[in-house]
Image (cartoon, rainbow, N blue to C red):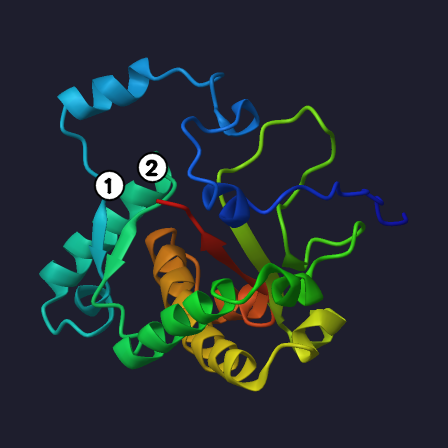
Amino acid sequence: MGELEVNYKEVPSVQELAKKKLVTIPSRYVRDDHDNSSIASNDRNNKEVPVIDMQRLVNSNDHDIMNLELNKLHFAAQHWGFFQLINHGVSSSVVEKMKHETQKFYDLPLEEKKKFERSPRDADGFGQLFAVSDEQKLDWADLFYLKTAPPHLRMPIFSKLYLSLRETIEEYTEEIKELSMKVLEMLGKALGIKEKEVKSLFEEGMQSMRMNYYPP
């Protein structure tokens, strides 16, 4: 079966729109189709996103503490679908470098960023993602999306990035890949799946990253 071809629409840069000091956000970026009552209800009940301590999962000598954290992870995955990870072991200097390089990219003039613009038929690159019609709602953000691993899935745009950004992405995604495998192994453990089976399924899996710019 051949790949489904989608022609993405070119849309304005949100960063450039925000520079105009708009009184109101354009209607195309206002999500008026969401039910806010559930958010208000959650606030009233003071529900908080689950927080998982990675050190307790992988480096704890106390099996009771480890099992407690594993149960929290299992609950978060089953009932929330996401969680905040703390003490994850990713180098803070690498994270700061990634933040710095992302900021540096978005500080470039628009014409420079457009050199990395995604093509109408591909998601990789700078620009809104999944914009396929002139009527659909869009995110109030600019984004830069890249497939980073395995290397053969990288689009030509990756090799065109300036050196400091490319090197930082390589360093950052390598640490994230290592962390992701640890999380997947823990999720597998919570489900009774052997570590080697998790590795065989995910170790060579696709990795991608998305760098967002949100106006104030």
The answer to whether any part of residue 195 appears in the image is no
Q: Is residue 114 left or right of residue 71?
A: right
Say whether residue 38 is left or right of residue 48.
Answer: right
Between 44 and 69, the one nearer to me in the picture: 44
Work out whether residue 65 can be spotted: yes
Q: Is residue 68 left or right of residue 137?
A: left
The residue labelled by disc 1 is: 49
- Within 10 Å of the Cα at label 1, are there few (<14), some (14-19), or many (20+) other Cα atoms? few
Contact (Cβ within 8 Å) of mark 1 with mark 2 = yes
Where residue 26 sits in the image (x, y, percent)?
52, 27
Q: Is residue 102 left or right of residue 68?
A: right
User: Which residue position is annotated with label 2?
Assistant: 80
Compare residues 184 and 215 and report the one nearer the observer.
215
Find residue 130 and report its image quarter: top right
- Is the residue 70 above or below the residue 151 in the image? above
Image height of 189 relative to 163, above or below: above
Give the spatial CA distance, label 1 vs label 2: 8 Å
Q: Secondary structure at mark 2?
A: loop
Residue 209 image position (x, y, % from top left) = 53, 62
Q: Earlier in the sequence, mark 1 or mark 2?
A: 1
Q: Which mark is residue 74?
A: none
